Image (cartoon, rainbow, N blue to C red):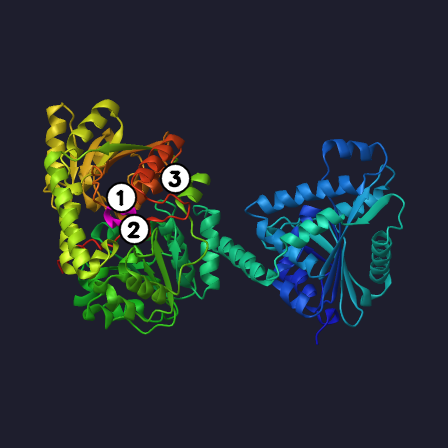
């Protein structure tokens, strides 16, 4: 077994020319069995562990002794400076507990702090607290400022170091705050041997509390118990996560847009998961940028990438994003679908996805899903063990029509979706999760994104829409037919998809709510009361007929509007630009659900009834993107519920009503105005829908895969 003596140490290491971690710190820890350290404040001790070598050190029987000081309140610190009576264990414990809680509450230090707690709980690390009294000598004070350390191996050889270090975890990398250290091996003899002996003697005296001017104590029991509770038994897993997150940070160019903490954690977890997994992150939280960084890593290693998208709009957005964000790598992009045919006519797909040769440029394929699902595409993809497939709106891969895409043999896979679980489609969800290898924990929810100021908070304003007499009568008639048919066949009303007759009746009944005549006057009322010139509004309609009715009714009230839908004759991009520049009311249909980025929009009115959780979650997310001057967004929602039929069961047994009420409950729970939740809960109670916190929209929803755009190639 190698030891410290096998390494040739320089007399000193300087950050400006040396890799302090790679050249000194980590090699020492990997071959040592004891590490004694005076690390200044306890918060510094959290980061004083040589992380990449930590597992080797512990597995080799290594033990660490740390002497550090807690951060005291100004009152306690003043008392110490003036030589008052020493702090009690209770006061010392309170100071340490406050510091521990601060570390555990901080996103950046939480995992390192838990690792240290786990090591302490396991007995691998022993910590004692030092309090410098008023009579402490300059030498004693310098000892704590200079951060003295001693590495000792099995043979009894010791390497000491001393230097002024502002030590953090990043301080162990070339980008950190370690400035310089002096190094003195015990076997060098002479002055170096004496320095090791003096430092070891001083450390032992401090450890045994034998120096009058320094009060050294064990961690008070109240803090020790807290540490034991906070320390996970699987601290090794956290070490891997800390290292992976540091690697992600290091791989991001200094001049690039910084990654947010949730993006760093997601990329690190994806790496640890074998570069496979689905990212379940809220709409607008930066999924695309996260994936671009994964592409950067793979391209930097000599690999290639395929990006799959469901629409021509997203194809163009990804083209622009990859070109801009990876400009320093200058990748070559090959587009497939939406009129882009060179991948096939020039037979470029195979070389674009093959193993790159030395000197060849990075290459990325961006393809429409419908194109990529063809034999012509799939048979041209090279068998490459360094190929990454990114799938935007990855839930689409669970649909029956997307099954050919699940044959892609790429070893590395990342799926992006705010809602990867397919409502009412367990088989499709299973196919999806199997292809990607599951969902990368933790999910990043809309509430997380609002808390972190990634998205804008919103007020939710629900509006009741009553059915007119004819609609109510038709609804009740279809409800009776549904109950009779279900009773005759022994089926349940919450499982109508299993019976074609029931399914048709349910669709006909749902269409009544979808096309409720009261939605159009509600739209006019809301916009007439709330719209101000210069604001940017989205109105989501169920279809072109409703869109036309809404626009006509608005025009009758002298309210101009813009239209946006897949079959419009005008320029869609110009329409969006008009809204962005001048403001206005944009009346749209489903084509705004995926891919359109309109961060300036601050108001939305939802007229479209949807049983697909994905659709309404995306509609909400569309108005929550941050924009200068947008402190709060406003979401108006048309809620159509029929008058209760005395013969009918509660909505709990009616999947249509349950789905609608679960949707509004979901919206109300995430809103900034609590009165919305009160109003919605009252409605749920009235219709017998459970309002427990674990109630989810997916249980009552139905997966509807919107048609992937027609190909023209």
Q: Earlier in the sequence, mark 2 or mark 3?
A: 3
The segment highlighted magenta reads: 649-659
Q: Is residue 656 magenta?
A: yes
**Residue under the image location 24 percent in, 68 percent down:** 404
Q: Quadrant of the C terminus?
A: bottom left
* Circle 1/circle 3 CB separation < 8 Å: no
Residue placed under numbered mark 3 in the picture: 669
Q: Is residue 336 visible?
A: no
On screen, residue 474 versus residue 606, left or right, reads left
Q: Secondary structure at mark 2?
A: loop
Residue 625 position, x and y percent, is: 35, 39
Residue 436 position, x and y percent, is: 36, 64
Q: Secondary structure at mark 3?
A: helix
Q: Is residue 191 above or below residue 56?
A: above
Residue placed under numbered mark 1 in the picture: 660
Q: Earlier in the sequence, mark 2 or mark 1?
A: 1
Residue 197 position, x and y percent, is: 86, 60
Q: Is residue 655 above or below residue 624?
A: below
Foreground residue among 46 and 191? 46
Residue 590 position, x and y percent, is: 20, 45
* Circle 2/circle 3 CB separation < 8 Å: no
For residue 456, what is the image quadrant?
A: top left
On screen, residue 169 versus residue 331, left or right, reads right
Q: Residues within 10 Å of mark 1 (few under 14, many from 20)?
A: many
Residue placed under numbered mark 2 in the picture: 700
Q: Secondary structure at mark 1?
A: helix
Q: Which mark is residue 47?
A: none
**Residue under the image location 86 percent in, 42 percent down:** 137
Foreground residue among 502 and 584? 502
């Amino acid at each position: 077994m190698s030891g410290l003596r096998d390494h040739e140490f320089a007399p000193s290491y300087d950050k400006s020319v040396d890799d302090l971690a790679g050249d000194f710190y980590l090699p020492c820890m990997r071959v040592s069995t004891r590490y004694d350290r005076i690390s200044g404040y306890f918060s510094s001790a959290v980061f004083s562990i040589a992380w990449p070598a930590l597992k080797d050190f512990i597995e080799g029987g290594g033990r660490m002794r740390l002497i550090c000081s807690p951060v005291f309140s100004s009152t306690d610190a003043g008392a110490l400076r003036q030589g008052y009576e020493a702090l009690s264990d209770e006061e010392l414990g309170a100071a340490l507990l406050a510091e521990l809680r601060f570390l555990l509450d901080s996103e950046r230090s939480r995992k390192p702090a838990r690792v240290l707690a786990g090591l302490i709980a396991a007995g691998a690390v022993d910590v004692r607290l030092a309090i410098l009294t008023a009579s402490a000598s300059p030498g004693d004070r310098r000892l704590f400022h200079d951060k003295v350390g001693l590495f000792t191996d099995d043979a009894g050889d010791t390497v000491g170091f001393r230097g002024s270090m502002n030590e953090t975890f990043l301080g162990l990398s070339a980008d950190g705050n370690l400035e310089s250290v002096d190094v003195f091996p015990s076997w060098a003899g002479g002055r170096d041997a004496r320095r090791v002996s003096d430092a070891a003697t001083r450390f032992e005296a401090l450890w045994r509390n034998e120096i009058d001017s320094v009060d050294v104590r064990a961690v008070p029991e109240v803090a020790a118990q807290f540490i034991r509770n906070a320390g996970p038994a699987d601290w090794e897993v956290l070490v891997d996560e800390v290292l992976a997150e540091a690697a992600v940070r290091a791989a991001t160019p200094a001049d690039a847009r910084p990654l947010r903490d949730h993006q760093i954690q997601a990329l690190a977890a994806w790496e640890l998961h074998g570069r496979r997994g689905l990212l379940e992150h809220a709409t607008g939280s930066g999924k695309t940028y996260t994936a671009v960084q994964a592409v950067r890593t793979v391209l930097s290693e000599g690999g290639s990438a395929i990006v799959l998208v469901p629409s021509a709009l997203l194809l163009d957005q990804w083209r622009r994003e990859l070109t801009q964000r990876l400009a320093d790598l200058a990748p070559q992009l090959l587009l497939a679908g939406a009129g882009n045919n060179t991948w096939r006519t020039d037979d470029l797909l195979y070389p674009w996805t093959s193993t790159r040769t030395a000197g060849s440029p990075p290459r990325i394929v961006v393809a429409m899903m419908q194109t990529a699902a063809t034999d012509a595409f799939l048979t041209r993809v090279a068998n490459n063990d360094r190929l990454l497939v990114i799938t935007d709106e990855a839930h689409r891969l669970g649909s029956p029509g997307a099954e050919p895409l699940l044959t892609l043999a790429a070893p590395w896979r990342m799926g992006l979706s705010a809602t990867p679980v397919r409502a009412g489609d367990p088989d499709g969800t299973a196919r999806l999760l199997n292809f990607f290898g599951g969902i990368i924990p933790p999910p990043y929810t809309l509430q997380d994104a609002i808390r972190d100021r990634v998205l804008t908070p919103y007020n939710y304003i629900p509006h009741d829409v009553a059915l007119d007499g004819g609609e109510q009568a038709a609804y009740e008639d279809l409800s009776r037919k549904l109950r009779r048919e279900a009773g005759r066949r022994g089926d349940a009303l919450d499982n109508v998809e299993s019976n074609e007759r029931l399914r048709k009746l349910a669709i006909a009944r749902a269409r009544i709510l979808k096309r409720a005549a009261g939605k159009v006057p509600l739209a006019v009322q809301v916009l007439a009361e709330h719209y101000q010139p210069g604001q940017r509004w989205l109105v989501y309609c169920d279809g072109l007929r409703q869109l036309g009715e809404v626009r006509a009714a608005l025009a009758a009230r002298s309210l101009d509007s813009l239209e946006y839908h897949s079959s419009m004759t005008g320029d869609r991009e110009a329409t969006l630009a008009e809204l962005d520049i001048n403001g206005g009311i944009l009346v749209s249909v489903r084509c705004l659900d995926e891919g359109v980025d309109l961060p300036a929009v601050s108001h939305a009115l939802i007229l479209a009834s949807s049983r697909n959780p994905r659709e309404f979650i995306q509609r909400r997310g569309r108005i929550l993107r941050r924009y200068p001057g947008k402190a709060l967004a406003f979401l108006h929602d048309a809620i159509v519920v029929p008058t209760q039929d005395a013969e009918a069961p509660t909505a709990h047994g009616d999947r249509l009503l349950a789905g609608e009420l679960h949707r509004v409950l979901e919206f109300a729970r995430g809103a900034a105005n609590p009165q919305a939740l009160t109003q919605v809960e009252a409605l749920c109670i009235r219709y017998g829908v459970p309002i427990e916190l674990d109630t989810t929209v997916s249980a009552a929803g139905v997966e509807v895969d919107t048609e992937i755009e027609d190909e023209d190639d």
